[in-house]
Each structure stands twice: as structure tokens, then as C-alpha cells.
Image (tube, grey):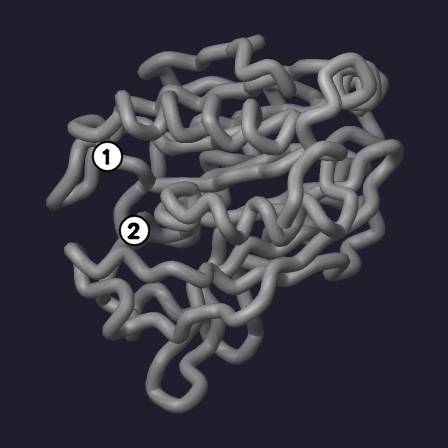
Amino acid sequence: MKVYLFQQDIIWHDRQANYVHIQEMLTKTQPEPNSLLILPEMFDIGFSMNTETTAQEATLPSEQALKGFTEQFQIDIIAGTVTQMIDHRPANEAVWISSKGEIKLRYQKMHGFSPSGEDQVYHPGQTIQVLDFQEFCICPFICYDLRFPEVFREALGHGVNLFIVIANWPAKRRNHWIKLLQARAIENQAFVIGVNRVGKDPNVDYAGDSLIVDPKGEILIHLKEKEQILAYDLDPKIVDQWRSQFPAIKDRKI
């Protein structure tokens, strides 16, 4: 399976500008049909607690823009968006849209980042979501979820062999980001892809550090601090071989 990691410099609170920028980057890259493009958390607006701004209108403009990209380039996309206001709080989501413009998965972030007040203004998700795509069983998570290994372990019970974590993870904790992505890969003997943003918003600097980590915890690609799109071919047999060779998952008791 070919994946494209889009380490994006998100334009603060400007959906239309982000749509235009993504269109330009994809036109330049020309991703391969039937591949998967991964965008960061809140790709369209930035990690903001201003829910009146981040929550999409009833027409869901960001999802319509994503559908346009998937149909134009014949790719699947997973990206971070914010739903409409429901009961006074929207949800921070990862949405997966197929190359035919269909919604295949919608995951709501389970762990709100309390230091920023996210847990107070966004509705928390209650369940993991799993999707089969090509030869992979995939589970997405969002940013702060990465610090909670129990939800990854729950997903493992559904046969997951690839985790995708989209984020707006700050530069000052970049070391945690890298090590936690490696830890989730090692303990679950699975591929882990982390896609973070670069640049800055009014409150935070971002270092990128988007990664693909293999089931042994080895970093296969590391995007550092530059905005870019990078492609990589993932082979599910690597997961099968390592789990067979070193049967830690089979040997677990709970």
C-alpha cells in the first residue's frame, strides 16, 4: 500500500486558504491513484479552542473539499476536521473519504487535551474505529490519544496492523511524540504512522517530525521540520513475519 504523508503548515483560521494550498501541493505531487493521503489534525483551521470558528457549517465545507481532492486524484484521504455544533460542543474528528468521495470512517478524538481546555469545549469520542483498506486493518487516533496505550491495545484485538495518528503536536514535546510513536509500534508489533503539522499558530510552534515506524520500532522515514509530502510503500507481510518470529502478542495474558 502506498501512503503519502502530508506534513502541512496550516494557515490559521482560514479554510479557503488551506484548501487552495493543499490543491497546489497535490497538483505538484500528483499522488499515485489508489494510494492513501494523510493530513494532520484540524487540517483546515489549526488547533483552536474557538469552536465557533472550527466547527464546520451544515454544508461541511472541509469534507466537501476533501471529497473533491479524492475524486480528482483518485486517492483515499484521512484528515482531521471538526463537526457541527451538537449539544453546544463539536467533536474533533478524523474522517476517511474514499476515492469515490464516500465517507468510510469517522473517528472522534477520545482524549481531549486538558491543558489547552480541549476537554471542556470538544465532545469526547467513546469508541475506536477500524477500517480494512487494501491489505491492512487500520485504526486512526488523534494527537493526545497517543499517550493512552490502552486504546491501542483495544484496537489490536480487532486485528489492527497499522495505526495512524494525526496531530498538532507542539515542538517543545517533540521528543515525547517520537518516542511514543515508537513505543506504540513496539508493544503492538504494528506499523505506526504519525502525521504532524509544521509552522506556528498564535500559541504554539510545531516541529513536524512526521514518522513511519515499523513493527520493531525502527523509524523508516522522518520528515523533520519542513512542509512536504512524502510517499512510502508499506508491506503488511513485515507485520506478519515479525509477529510470527517474536510472538509477544500471542503470549499476552490480557
* Residue labelled with disc 2: 47
Q: Is residue 43 visible?
A: no
Rate crowding at label 2 as few (under 14), some (14 to 19) or many (20 or more) other CA atoms within 10 Å: many
**Closer-to-camera residue (78/18):** 78
Q: Is 9 situated above or below 117?
A: above
Q: Is 121 left, or right, of 108 in this rendering? A: left
**Spatial separation of the CA atoms under disc 1 and disc 2:** 11 Å
Q: Is 198 left, or right, of 151 in this rendering? A: left
Amino acid type, callout 2: Phe
Q: Is 154 situated above or below 124?
A: above
The quadrant holding residue 129 is: bottom right
Q: Are marks 1 and 2 in contact (CB under 8 Å)?
A: no
Rendered residue at 50%/50% (across/down): 150
Rendered residue at 34%/87% (across/down): 88
Query: Percent x, y for residue 181?
Result: 46, 28
* Residue labelled with disc 1: 170
Query: Percent x, y for residue 105?
Result: 70, 59
Which label is found at residue 13? none
The quadrant holding residue 231 is: top right
Amino acid type, callout 1: Pro
